[in-house]
Image (cartoon, helix red, strand yellow):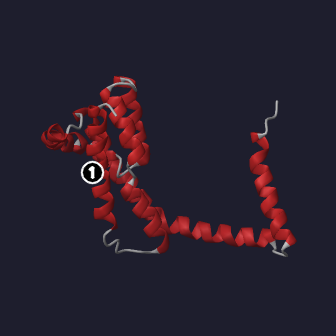
Amino acid sequence: MLKLTDFILPAVVFAITAFGAIRGVKVFDVFIEGAKKGLKTAVGILPALIALVVAVDMLRSSGALIFLCDILKPLAKITGIPKEILPLTILSPISGSGAVTMYESLLKDYGADSVIGRTASILMGSTETTFYAITIYYGSVGIKNTRHTLPCALSANIISYILSAQFVNLGL
């Protein structure tokens, strides 16, 4: 049985096409031109994306993730971040898919209503895949000097890690 939601996307595409045609725009030609620019952008950022994927895989496979978690355990204890969430805090600025996989694993192992599950949930909702975002957005327009973007974004993530644990510990 068809639902209204089945028609939303086709209706939007039709409305945009009709609006362009009414205004005298060669809709198909403009679409092709945009697709060419999009393809050039995708090819331009592909090397950076490949490097990011390889780095995440190396981090996991080499044992460096466990090593970093061991180093950060004393700091996590001071800030109230559960040690089980440390891999998520390391992966979340680097890889969205890696962070989601880790998040799902935490929910499966500890439950969504546990302190770990709630802290991980708040953390996932309040942090950004910083390195991925910088790679995509700056890489797509050829910016090499990110200036203050990286330190500010990582600072915001760190504050989110600490506050996510504090909010759960306070019962908020």
Foreground residue among 51 and 156: 156
Callout count = 1
Q: Would residue 85 be found to the left or right of residue 101 on screen?
A: left
Q: Position of residue 75 (x, y in %)?
A: 15, 43
Q: Amino acid at mark 1?
A: Ile
- The residue that label 1 is drawn on is 158
Quarter occupied by the N terminus: top right
Image spot of residue 37 (x, y percent): 62, 71
Seen at 79% across and 68% down, the residue is 28
Q: Residue 29's x, y, as percent? A: 77, 72
Picture quarter containing residue 61? top left
Label 1: which secondary element: helix
Residue under the image location 18 percent in, 41 percent down: 79
**Seen in the image, is 126 located left or right of residue 168?**
right
**Which x, y percent locates residue 14?**
82, 57
Residue closest to the eye, 79 or 135: 79
